[in-house]
Amino acid sequence: GEDVEQSLFLSVREGDSSVINCTYTDSSSTYLYWYKQEPGAGLQLLTYIFSNMDMKQDQRLTVLLNKKDKHLSLRIADTQTGDSAIYFCAERALSGGYNKLIFGAGTRLAVHP
Amino acid sequence: NAGVTQTPKFRVLKTGQSMTLLCAQDMNHEYMYWYRQDPGMGLRLIHYSVGEGTTAKGEVPDGYNVSRLKKQNFLLGLESAAPSQTSVYFCASSQPLRADSYNEQFFGPGTRLTVL
């Protein structure tokens, strides 16, 4: 079945790089996403990657996709306190006749001085 | 441009009571969704709508009903609330899903519901 897994917590020092990992099961997924949720708020799209790409870079964010291992990662360079949030990995999958997003449980990133 | 708004922000119900959560979007999106978020779990899709007057079941539809009478509004109803429905509820909207587009879903701020 469809499943997206990610570790629940990550703690990093300010200025270091953060790497959040995710594994997914549906090899036919066309798009994979990273959403960010700040305290008391809804989810906001951070970045996405199309399944025919291996890497995508956007300022401090680098997304790596390993389709063979069904592994997705998000690297945040020079992590700041404002990056403290929950990060959700999601895959777009066709299931039950409709396209849907399948979310992981979210990784809580804590940035400390 | 308010995006996606949800009312109320918080609510406490007793078991057996009913309530309706309202979602509104001003982006003229065709698709709208209701999710629930529980600790240690990802968002799970309750119901969704691909256009005015149409609704469909998601992964966890039991105990909920929805209506999409107007394009900009998507209502989620709980007819007889149960403690298992204690959760944070998120509404989202998007353009129709296309194979050649990443189709961002825009989320509301959430409604925190507690059922005693």
Image (cartoon, coloured by chain):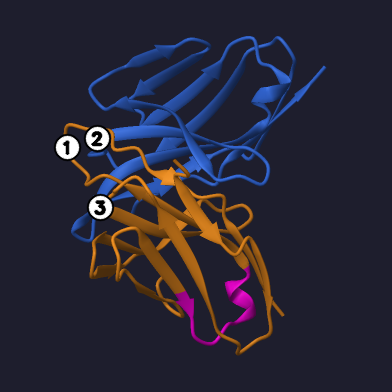
Q: State the CA–CA distance, disc 2 to disc 3.
A: 21 Å
| Residue receiving disc 1 | B99
Residue beneath the point at 36% across and 50% down: B93
**Marks 2 and 1: which is nearer the front?**
1
Chain B shown in which color? Answer: orange
Q: Nearer the viewer, residue B102 or A24?
A: B102
Q: Are marks 3 and 1 in contact (CB under 8 Å)?
A: no
Indicate left or right for A32 with A89 as reference: left
Please determine if labels 2 and 3 lie on a single subunit. no
Q: Which mark is residue A30?
A: 2
Q: Quadrant of residue A12?
A: top right
In the figure, the blue chain has which letter?
Answer: A
Q: Secondary structure at mark 3?
A: loop
Q: Are marks 2 and 1 in contact (CB under 8 Å)?
A: yes
**Protein chain holding label 2:** A
Amino acid type shown at disc 1: Ala
Q: Which mark is residue B30?
A: 3
